[in-house]
Amino acid sequence: MKKLLKILAVLLVLIIASLFILPIAFKSKIIEAVQEEANNNLNAKLKFADLNLSLISNFPNISAELEDLTIVGVDTFATDTLVGFKSLKATLDLMSVISGTEIKVKELILNKPNVNVKILENGLANYDIAKEDTTNTETEIDTTSSSNFKINLDKFEIIDGNITYDDLEGNMFANIENMNFTLSGDATETITNLDMNLLIDALTVKYDGIKYINKAKTTFKSDMQADLEKSKYTFKENTFKLNEVNLGFDGFVEMPTDDINIDIKFKTKDAKFKDVLSLIPAVYMTDFEDVKTSGKFNMDGYVKGIFNDKNMPAYGINLLVMNAKFQYPDLPKSVNDINVNMKVDAKEGSGDDITIDIKKASMTMANNPFKMSTLIKMTAADVDMGGNVKGKLDFNSIKDIVPLEDMKISGIMTADMSFKGKLSDIENENYEKFDAKGSMQVEKMGIIMADMPKININSADMSFAPQYVDLRKFDMTLGKSDFHLIGKIDNLFSYVFKDELLKGTFNFTSKYIDVDELMGTVDEETESSENAESTEDGIVEIPGNIDFVLNSTIDKIKYDNINITNAKGKIIIKDSKLDMQGLNMDMLGGSIVMSGSYDTKNKENPLADFNMKINNFNIAEVSKTFLSVKKIAPIIENCMGDFSADMSFKSLLDKEMMPVVESIMSSGDINSNNITIKDSKIFNLLASKTKQNKFKSPRVESLNLKYFIDKGNLNIDPTDFKIAGSKVTFGGTQSVDQKLDFNLGMLLPKNVAGNLLSKLPIGNSDEDVDVTARIGGTAEDPKIVGFTSSVTDILKDDVQEKVDDAKDKVNAESKKILDDAQKQADKIIKTAEEQADNIRKEAKKAGDKLIK
């Protein structure tokens, strides 16, 4: 018995010790195996800081926790983090893990997950990270018996999650901030109940550049019945709340195949007009509880049908607001007579068959009535439309109606417009069948917002016709910049209803445009390093859905540290691309005629492609302005004077709108008769080596360089010009990593050349000698690596000729000796052959005699 007790005690100690030791002992191997297996199966990089395994903290359960897990993309998405967790914790029933037949997951908790989903315009998505299975094996699956392996999930929880969905292909953006979610239920039953609770602090949804929901507080509570065998989920008791709008759901979602069968109805619960006001950010975020309201509000709708890649379910929405008003208690004016009667119906199918019927939408703001109505029937074949807008909006009264903390607005807008007809009649130019008329005017509108230049639309006047919108006048200032437009906008209805290009042709004039102010550039001297926040990329994006021609005249433009004057030419904005055709401007002490394009189809790396004819640019101004030029040719900082050029330039741009040096392709001619080089390291070195002080601050004349740059590699054709009054020849290459290989040929006195070259021919000591300085090192640290001369080359040729003559003489003498030797050898051989013949004859006689 004592032995048995001792054995049991030892076993108990070993078991308890194992609970502590085993997770620690195998921890590193488990981490290595998990990361290796994940990276073998993912086109992404999975990392986590630590893995904690415990049999103690939740005994008899086992817990596993991953800390600081991240999944980062590769290639195109190499800088994008798809998923990141503060921690991921799973608690499992130990005995169920050991048996393996039914794993019971007590809890699965995601703590502070950050998910960033991104879809590029070409459809490439950062979440598509699973590697394809290249194995070609066929495995028969027994579908007659069900698996004994089941997972029983008791609770799933997300704590403080953030999700961003950025779909550039579909032009849709959504953001969820501080999401908390719990799901509990028994997933081992065929039919089970799932309890869901969702709370989102801020939900934002944007489509086609319009924010439909902005930082709305969202809650969702649901008691859902799940038929896991049929993949059918039925809503029982549930509520969905968006700010103060409370919706109830009834129906089901069924997913037995790739098709999703939906049959859901929704309706507002205990709705008041004040609830719908909560969806307007300016109203909801400022003293919303004290707003006085009256009137009725109701919304209901449905979604019914099959949803898949080719089919959209039918859906409908009914919205009704009757005799509503609202007023802030501390403000003198109210918005009255708010009425909306809207119905949207879409048939099941391609998604093109939609009817939008706004029977009435009206309000009176500060005693100014405004009303509209419209009926739009859209099909794949055509759009039948009709509507009208009439009224006056006095923006001076906004401050008396809604408190505006960070914004001031003033001005008056009046509108009186109507339209009726088919879109096909406009597209087929049957304008007499389409009725469109009216006008809209804006007077003295001012908008002041935080962190933005002040906007003043002094006057705007538009009239409407079936063919076009006539912009008779548009005068606006934006900060220090002014804009004046006159022209016509075509294709407006096709743009609105079919998402086609919005076309327009305008005469555009401006006295001054401050690009720095418009882009929000902050002066480095005034920016506080403590309060400075990271800003978005400085890339200027060109819209892809407009086709505008601007015949432009701009008196002055300020961009970065460049002052541009007298800019004239045609600017075409189309397909995310800005084309400049014969744009003339004065800048950098001279003038330029530029044609080319700035293409932003690739938003990560826009493409600049220009041809430029430059006249008398000041070199010092160019050096201060263009960092890329200084990077390629640092010597420009030591140059004074001006130059002209005829050149092409093509390069990708980085996020600061700077050329990517490795992508630069350029060629052209650069000429000047007025350049002085001062304090240049290479020319000071040249002056010292050649004992010619004139090279210390030389003047360059008759310069006409031909160059080309290929992927950042600079090549200069050998060119003759004058430096310090002396003719020189210059040419060579500079690699993209700034390594130099140039030759500078010049005439030097013979006594100077003699000190630089190893040997010179005998001749007149007063004559000049051609000497070439070989320049190496780098653009930042150039060096003279040696000297050569065409005279020494001739000398080498003379020596080589004498060597060759000597070789010929030796060869001739050798041949004579060989010929004489051959004659002697032939004579000896002939004599020997004659003697041998005589010996054979005598031997034969002797033999015959002996035999006889």
Image (cartoon, rainbow, N blue to C red):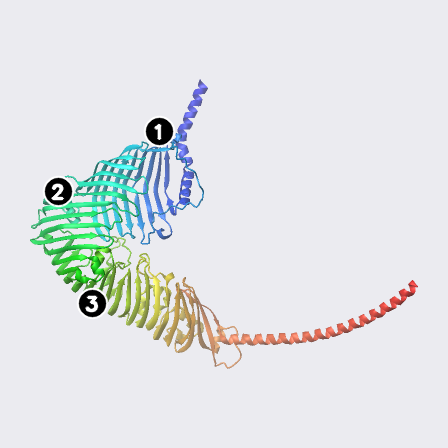
Q: Residue furthest top?
A: 1
The 10 Å Cα crowd at callout 1, few under 14, some 14 to 19, many 20 or more, is few
Q: Does residue 301 appear in this view?
A: yes
- Measure the alpha-carbon separation of dots 1 and 2: 52 Å
What's the residue at 50%, 82% (across, down)? Answer: 764
Residue 738 vs residue 117: left or right?
right
- Measure the alpha-carbon separation of dots 3 and 1: 79 Å
**Circle 3 sits on which residue?**
509
Q: Does residue 287 appear in this view?
A: no
What's the residue at 41%, 30% (across, down)? Answer: 18
Residue 767 screen position, x and y as percent: 48, 81
The amino acid sitting under disc 2 is Lys
The amino acid sitting under disc 1 is Pro
Residue 643 vs residue 326: left or right?
right
The amino acid sitting under disc 3 is Thr
**Circle 1 sits on which residue?**
60
**Circle 2 sits on which residue?**
272
Name the secondary structure under disc 3: strand
For the residue pair 741 and 687, the one nearer the viewer reads as 741
Q: Where 229 sits versus 129, above or below?
A: above
Quarter holding residue 381: bottom left
Residue 742 screen position, x and y as percent: 43, 69
Q: Earlier in the sequence, mark 1 or mark 2?
A: 1
Dot 2 and dot 3 residues touching (CB under 8 Å): no
Q: Where 836 sits versus 73, above or below?
A: below
The 10 Å Cα crowd at callout 3, few under 14, some 14 to 19, many 20 or more, is many
Name the secondary structure under disc 2: loop
What's the residue at 16%, 57% (across, down)? Answer: 420
Q: Where 651 sits versus 188, above or below?
A: below
For the residue pair 477 and 266, the one nearer the viewer reads as 266
Q: Residue furthest right?
A: 852
